[in-house]
Image (cartoon, coloured by chain):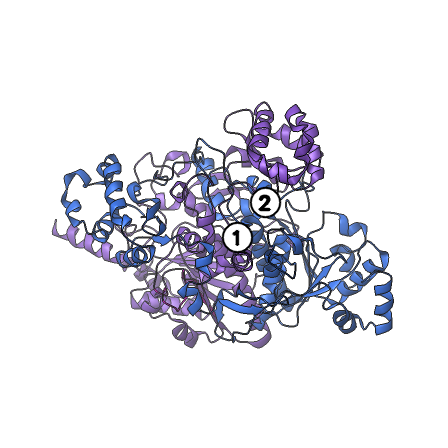
Amino acid sequence: MPYGALEEIIVLDLSDRLAASFCAKTLGLYGCEVIKVEPLSGDPLRKWTNSNPNNQSGDSPLFLHLNAGKKSITINLDAVEGQNILAALMKVCDVVVETQKPGHLDKIGLAYNQIKKSNPSIIFTSITPYGQTGPYKNFHYDELTLFAMTGAMYREGLPEREPLRYSGEIAQYFAGNAAAAATTAALFKRTLTGQGDWLDISIQECMAGHPHQIGRRAPFIYAGEPDLRSEPRTSAAGAREPYAVGTFRCKDGYFSFLPLGPRMWPNIAKMIDREDLMVNPKYEDTIKRSENQEELEAIFQAWLDDKTREEIFRAVQAAGVPGSPILPPEEVHKNEQFHERGFFQNVDHPNGQTLRMTGDPFRFSNAPTSSLKAAPQLGQNTNEVLRKLLEFSDDQMEMLAMENII
Amino acid sequence: MNSEVNQPLSSIRALELSEIWAGPFCGSLLGDMGAEVIKIESIQRIGRGPINPPANAGGYPDNDPGKEPWNRQSNFNAINRNKKSLTLDLKTQPGLNSFKDLVSQSDVVFCNYARTVMENFGLSYEQVRKIKPDIIYMLMPGYGNDGPYANYRSMGMAIDAITGHSYLRGYPDMDQSSNSLVHHPDAVSATNGVMALTSALVYRAKTGKGQFIDMSQAESFMTHLGEIYLENQMTSSIRKRRGNRHPDFAPQGVYKCSGDDNWIAISIKTDKEWYQLKAIIGDNSLEDTDLDSLEARLQNHDHLDATINEWASTRDRYDALTLLQAAGITSGVVIDCGADSYADPHLNERNFFQIVDHPAAGLYPMTGPIFKFGSDQGRITHNPAPCLGQDNEHILEELLGYSRNTINKFKTDEIIGTVPLPGSDMGGSRRVAKLRKENSKD
């Protein structure tokens, strides 16, 4: 949308899972024309999940988010005629984003190595849970089980309880985002050389190679330091101020803090109006403050008890203490900062609802902001796309529709 | 940085002014794809941990910080692969001039310090553009460059809180104060930053024009939570914390296997998976046909969890995984970031770990890169994180054509260096000056 950097690039989105769909959506934000290829029954994510009883159009919030701005065409890929149409589209498009089981596209003659013979500049971005090779390549997955296998879950939660996943669909989004970035790098190379490429993106590797994980794997391999679940108030990374680390209750909700080391002590004491504590020998250094952690925590909590998140947010910013209010989702899309930057845009949907949708997190100097579009209805653009890209006639398309191919 | 000439970004030079995660990881990803990334550091202010950590401090090879702890720190070394290091004191005129000379030969400048840092150096986009009109210049502050929070400082955990993700994480039976702090949004800023920069490179290749990019780290992560904001507007029910469960499927959970703190994640979403699981567990209490309906499984989730836990408790997690996957059941073992991940047969078969020889830290298997390009034969080299200022002379002499005399004077004047100044790990040049003043009194 706002930024036409990738205009004139046509992306075929063959996704039926989140990561690949988000990859294609991200490319669309930068100007690509994204054509979503769906089976006649529709992308399964249209019904994902059924917790949207009030949504008359039937499409899930997840589908509406992932597919904003895309076009939708339907092709029956179980039929040879359908496969032929897809092959013809691959010859004229620039990027294919796909998430089939490794080897599946080879069987039907639609893999990168087969298509590149007729379209050498094509870029295939394959996004699968565990990549194209290796013993897990055919594993069944979802966010919960994949997140478990990245190294990210083991440290989440309390030591005496079960490890926890993040909320949302974090690993899959992250991989989709990384895949879009790598795809764009491949597009850059293509503008210089004319050569395409094939990207093998493993969601597991994206998350296992993420700073949280590599930052914890290094102390293990350097010195055998395990990456254990810990109590929320412990000072895992050394000399932090543990009485003020973590998430605390306040007057109207919760607030998270992360003071980074002893130099934060004066900032905290001033912030809570207790500069007297700074001259109290009980709290004179990190060791003493740790020994008297409970007392200090009670003092800190007493200050928080009659403050709102908004008041605390202003106070931490003035004092230079890292921290942030915990917002429930309904407050996020009404928040003044995101509102003022125009990040959420009102988008009219076919069901008559106007929804605030997340836009582009960037402002580009060379790009005006334009408006977001709603996700397409099933097959909304089939005729338009086949006419434009493959020069199909109305008769041809009518015939294909009758034969349940499109 | 990589030897392969054919990499996507091998024609690109990028200048990184960053610390912690978001900017450095963005730089590493660019370096992975062939860009020459020069990390601009200084001996006046380092982001490589303490200069004098205690002798047994954690996070160093063999728990020994050594003589150059700043070159041995695990977090820095893990996250800064595939880049060079140049130190410059940007608060001096010669340091600033050198940076500008470098800009004239670069394609990209990016910075994840607070919004005003570059401006204060006299290196705003408008100023940098005068030197290199088609420069691509990205700032990535927490909340973007405008709006009421424009000057607010942030960290990954703060973004996690303000976007709603923290609110939804955690054990459903406990309150928010039991939550860990999660810095995941920093990593999202890195991948989104690469997305913005590479798209700007495509745009420049087509139009010859550079770009100023203002990225909000908060908004960046919020694009990963979009369906939650929509769900909130589309339905009357407010999403609650779910832990490892899902409101529409059961059973879902993480179950304890035999051994010490070993777990397996199981996610049953279809009736077919449910029947398979019943057959594998073979417990009479699951034979109640009522449980074959999703509704009943959701209602009896605690009972199902207890039964699955009992079954898992006597099984090796990998044996359980093999059994469940063979039956088509969505499942995964919980692996840690230590021995488990290094032993993982799949990650190993895909060459996820590379033996990296770091000049100050030694020979260790390190993680990543995460991209596999077919044209690279599927393997990008992981070059070790740079030592502080290791490329000073090479860059100043070869790239900028400075004379030996100038370089030597830079060293004497502490514009460049390879050893951080006392106090440079405690907040920068003011602290360095203060310590120096105190020392001169002695």
Q: Chain of mark 2?
A: A
Rendered location of residue A189, percent (x, y): 62, 64
Say which element carries label 1. loop
Establish if A114 lies above or below A280: below
Q: Give the SS element for disc 2.
A: helix
For the point 59% across and 27% down, the residue is: B307
> In front: B37, or A400?
A400
Residue at mark 1: chain = B
Look at the image and give the colour of chain B: purple
Q: Residues within 10 Å of mark 2 (few under 14, many from 20)?
A: many
Question: Residue B402, relative to residue B254: is it above or below?
Answer: below
Looking at the picture, how far across and down is residue B45, in whole percent?
Answer: 31, 55
Q: Which residues are magenta?
A: B136-151
Is residue A138 inside the magenta stretch? Answer: no
Residues indicated by labels 2 and 1 sit on the same polypeptide chain? no
Pick the front one: A10 or A148? A148
Q: Determine the residue positioned at 57% across, 43% down.
A: B246
Q: Which residue is mark 2?
A: A204
Q: Are marks 2 and 1 in contact (CB under 8 Å)?
A: no
Q: Residue at x 66, y 50 (%)?
A: B377
As drawn, the label of residue A153 is none
In the displayed structure image, the side of residue B22 where residue A375 appears, left or right: right
In this rendering, position of residue B29 left or right of residue B126: right
Task: State the separation of the CA atoms marked 2 and 1.
Answer: 32 Å
Dot 1 surroundings within 10 Å: few (below 14), some, or many (20 or more)? few
Q: Which residue is mark 1?
A: B237
Chain A is shown in which shade?
Answer: blue
